[in-house]
Image (cartoon, grey):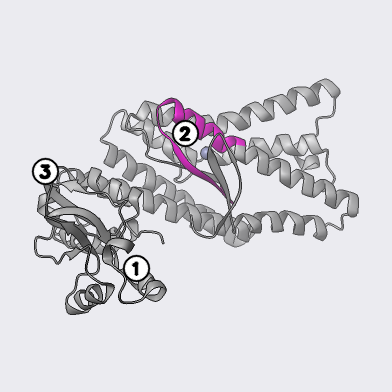
Amino acid sequence: MKWSWKIGSVAGIGIFMHWTFLLLLGWIVLMHARQGADAAAAIAGVVLVLAVFGCVVLHELGHALTAKRFGIRTRDITLLPIGGVARLERMPDDPRQELWVALAGPAVNVVIAAALFFSLEFTAGLMPFSQAARVGGGFASQLMWINVVLVAFNLLPAFPMDGGRVLRALLAHRLEYVRATQIAATVGQGMAILFGIVGLFFNPMLMFIALFVFLGAQEEAHHVQLRALLRGIPVRDAMMTRFTVLREDDSLAAAVRELLAGSQQDFPVVRDDRVVGVLPRQDLVRRLAEQGQQARVGDVMRKDCATAEDTEMLDGAFQRMRAANCPTLPVVRGGRLVGVVTLENVGELMMINSAYQSAVTRGRVEDIFKLEG
Ligand SMILES: [Zn+2]
């Protein structure tokens, strides 16, 4: 995710903090200051913030390690104000697995809250919510209540909250996946609007969360819809068959001439009709600045871009294209280059499709497949 800092890693999973998480921390600090807390209370506040931070990381690890049991790796974990996001390589296709993965996060907070509850009961140190919510309330009580709130909040049936996934998984037992997602997303957006209105009157932070939820629900719905659409289309129906290629011995100057001469932005590099790399426009421009016009295409091209067979379906091909973070997908038949798929021509295909599937528009397609970098 953009605008995130790496703060560590657990079990080979990088843990990042999104800058908006600082807003949450700032808000907590501000609450302390506004209530006229002294230095000791302020330090206790900071410790509490760090403890909450730890609980959120454990929550995400709950998701990640459950997914790992189903053979799904986690790319990274990012901390946001509404909680964390564990970016799984893919979602489980089986709704039952998705249900377990979604529930594992809140389950961690249930365990933490229960452990704190029983130890507080034992020491008679338990404070009611109203008392613990005040600055200087007992640390363990505060942490327990925060975990209770985390569970309740995460189980709201709204994407991108875990409750949204739970709802979708439950609906998907009886309905088609796309339909289940649409319903779950609509419920999520309805809740987001409700949050927004409540936030308007009581708490601006809630409006901020509402926006997050609304966009998250929308993105999830579009993404699933798009994947379902792409699933039925073979790569050969979406590929461009008129395109320009480069050779390894071409100079960057020649590549620039091709770039300026036509509408093509990213070029497959071939040797005897076989794809050996891709030179995207971004790389071409950057390398030109670094190494000058006379550099060889073969020395600067990317070799890690995916290719697709012309008979395979677009959804799988596109997933690989995104994973490789490459703007062009060379299409091969029997090892020979026969076409290229780009974001633009899939966008065009979607426009044609949207004549009868009005939900997905070209703009959204490009948004969803916007490649980072
Ligand atoms: Zn979660």
Magenta stretch bounds:
58-83
- What residue is shown at x 89% (from left), y 54% (from top)? 39
Q: Secondary structure at mark 3?
A: loop
- What residue is shown at x 61% (from left), y 58% (from top)? 205
Q: Name which of mark 3 and mark 1 comes first in the sequence.
A: 1
**Count of labels in the image:** 3
Question: Which sits in the foreground, 183 or 232?
Answer: 232
Residue 311, numbered label: 3
Q: Which residue is mark 2?
A: 102
Q: Callout 1 environment at 10 Å: few (<14), some (14 to 19), or many (20+)?
A: few
Q: Nearer the viewer, mark 3 or mark 1?
A: 1
- What residue is shown at x 31% (from left), y 28% (from top)? 173
- Location of the C terminus by quadrant is bottom left
Q: Nearer the viewer, mark 2 or mark 3?
A: 3
Q: Name which of mark 2 and mark 3 comes first in the sequence.
A: 2
Is 29 positioned to the left or the right of 322 in the image? Answer: right
Marks 3 and 1 close (CB-CB < 8 Å): no
Seen from this angle, which residue lies furthest top? 122
